[in-house]
Amino acid sequence: MKYLLRKAALYVFIAWAAITLNFAIPRLMPGDPIDLLAERTQGDLDPAALDALRQAYGLTEDNIVLQYRDYLVSLAQGDLGLSIGFYPVPVSEIVATSMPWTIGLIGITTVISFVIGTGLGVLLAWRRGTWTDGLLPALTFLNAIPYFWMALILVLIFAVNLGWFEVSGGYDPSITPAFSGEFVVSVIQHAALPAITIVLASFAGWVMGMRNMTVTVLGEDYVAMAEAKGLPNSRVMMGYAARNAILPSVTSFALSLGAVVGGSMLTEVIFNYPGVGYALFQAVQTQDFPLMQGMFLVISLAVIVANLMADVVYVLIDPRTRQEA
């Protein structure tokens, strides 16, 4: 318990640091969002309107301490500010609209890639020295292919030329979004090719990492002792080898899950998928600093929460951490 409390205290501090940096960086940059908005309106806004906008964006003449206090109060209320590119839509509304798409696509495919990759990695390590070693060059090649290149090739072949999948978008624009069978089918059709791309691009890395770690663990004395006792191969492989070899992958998986909130920008941009990554790309293009700031904060907090969950899993699967706790 002490172990988890120490970790929780550390992550609370890291979260505070991320929130503080998110507050400070825009204020250290030259200019502010209101200057950018005034340029876009070509001076059509009068000074009173500009002052009201600065008040809305928290860029008041108050000292930095009062601004920081107001910033924390707004965060506690779930207020991430107003978007410039989609003015006057709140940033929190844009994030809430984009998040389900990203979690549904990137989250599910990340879990699938991890499960397939780690399972296949354990199997290849257990059967090392057999014909399965012939799969390693193919996996290495697949892992080395640039992700964006694979996505473009798959779009060209299977979407443009063969027409098996939809080219872009999250659903058919002619269908009204609703919990209906027609809409769900359309969403699945549009998500199929991006999902296949993500799985193909990422599972080989999990396989290689898990196989190498499992091979190392199989050389440990406790594994040799388990085999000498005559334990079933399945128990030795899963209960002794895989359980210990997977520990480093848990941290990587937690980071991957945390990054899910940020979406896979390349995936969503190439497929015009309406997730967080695509919204962040649009924010960069339009210099929408409040939207970028809000999304970076959400992504940072998601990574922190994911790492805390990884530490909880460590306590459950590694007896040494329970002894420390």
Image (tube, rainbow, N blue to C red):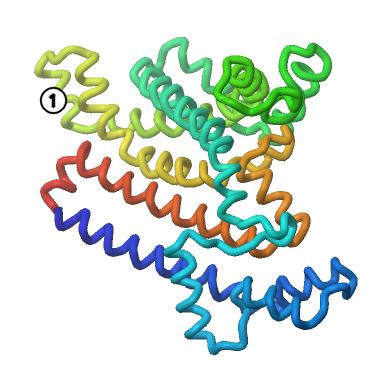
Q: Given the image, on which type of amino acid does mark 1 rest? A: Met
Residue 218 visible within the image: no
- Indicate whether 253 appears above or below 13: above
Q: Answer with left or right where residue 198 lies relative to residue 154.
A: left
- Which residue carries the number 1 mark? 225
x then y, percent, for residue 13: 35, 67
At x 22%, y 13%, the residue is 233
| 187 and 138: which is toward the camera | 187
Residue 128 visible within the image: yes
x then y, percent, for residue 169: 72, 30
x then y, percent, for residue 26: 63, 73
| 212 and 269: which is toward the camera | 269
Q: Answer with left or right where residue 12 lies relative to residue 171.
A: left
At x 21%, y 24%, the residue is 239
Q: Answer with left or right where residue 18 lies relative to residue 173.
A: left
x then y, percent, for residue 51: 70, 80
